Amino acid sequence: MYKEIIPKKWAAQYVDAYWIQSNKLQHKINRTILPDGCTDIILSFNNKDEKIVVGCMTKPNRVYIEPSELMFGIRFKTGCAAPFLNISTKELTDKQYSLSEIRNLNINFITPRVIEDKIFLIPDLVEKYLKKIFLENKFDKTACFAANLIKQHRGFKSIDDIANSMGISRRHLERKFMDFVGIPPKLYSRIIRFHYAHSMLLSQKNDSLIEMALDAGYYDQAHFCREYKEFSGITPTRKTDMSHFYNTSL
């Protein structure tokens, strides 16, 4: 079971979603996690409770969820996890660390009982704590603003145009993206464009891969297939085991 909880008005500036994944089956299940440009804090409750930070991903990641395992995540919007990190985002890219290695965050108020029985309290519980940290740790929002623009244009708009619309140089934007996201803005645009094409594929809005590729901004079908395989690990087909498990919805 996978469920997302929408953050409240204040936190929606910085948090994409709170998510819950559970496995009530007698066997472990697997999910393919797609790159989305976000950083997550994840709490896992099973035989060995874990708290980890997962950085921005540039490739698909296969995860296995054990029987009776319960997971809770805070998925920050692109470029908005900085107040919670005592580590460069570049060091987090395609990696995960124990939360205790990154920062001593006291989020023990999120327990299996809260997740299962008092899920409606999660936004209030988490956001009271988040707000204090955001107020105490001011951070540069250049990358956040740029990421929003890239997402609004579904990865179609050039990085030069994005930088110009913000009144900054491309070089300055690239530096801020590396500092606060961990990947270049051009790569993030490719990931966003892939997600748009992937959502079209899942919804079957278009029966032709060629037309889908062109609609999603790719030069041709071959270019689309190469990018799709790079970010998903498979070629674009109608039936996949892809999951949006802690991935941004477009």
Image: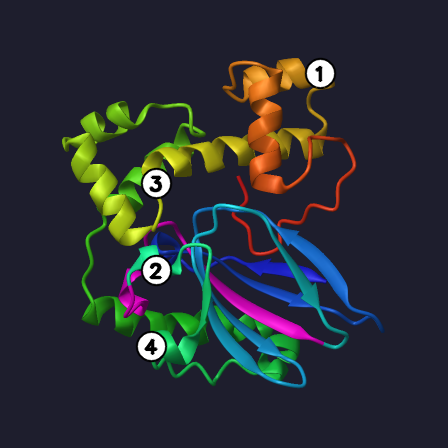
Return the residue at label 2: 91
Is 5 placed left or right of 210 in the picture? left
Q: Circle 4 — which element? A: loop
Residue matched to label 1:
208
Q: Residues within 10 Å of mark 3 (few under 14, many from 20)?
A: many
Q: Amino acid at mark 4?
A: Arg
Q: Which residue is mark 3?
A: 147
Q: Which mark is in front, 2 or 4?
A: 2
- Is residue 78 covered in magenta? yes
User: Label 1 is placed on what type of residue?
Assistant: Ser
Q: Which residues are the magenta region?
A: 69-87
Q: Mark 4 or mark 3, which has the lower sequence index?
A: 4
Q: Circle 3 — which element? A: helix
Q: Earlier in the sequence, mark 1 or mark 4?
A: 4
The residue lying at 20 percent from left, 68 percent from top is: 137
Location of residue 124 by image quarter: bottom left
Amino acid type of the residue tagged 3 in the rendering = Ala
Q: Are marks 2 and 3 in contact (CB under 8 Å)?
A: no
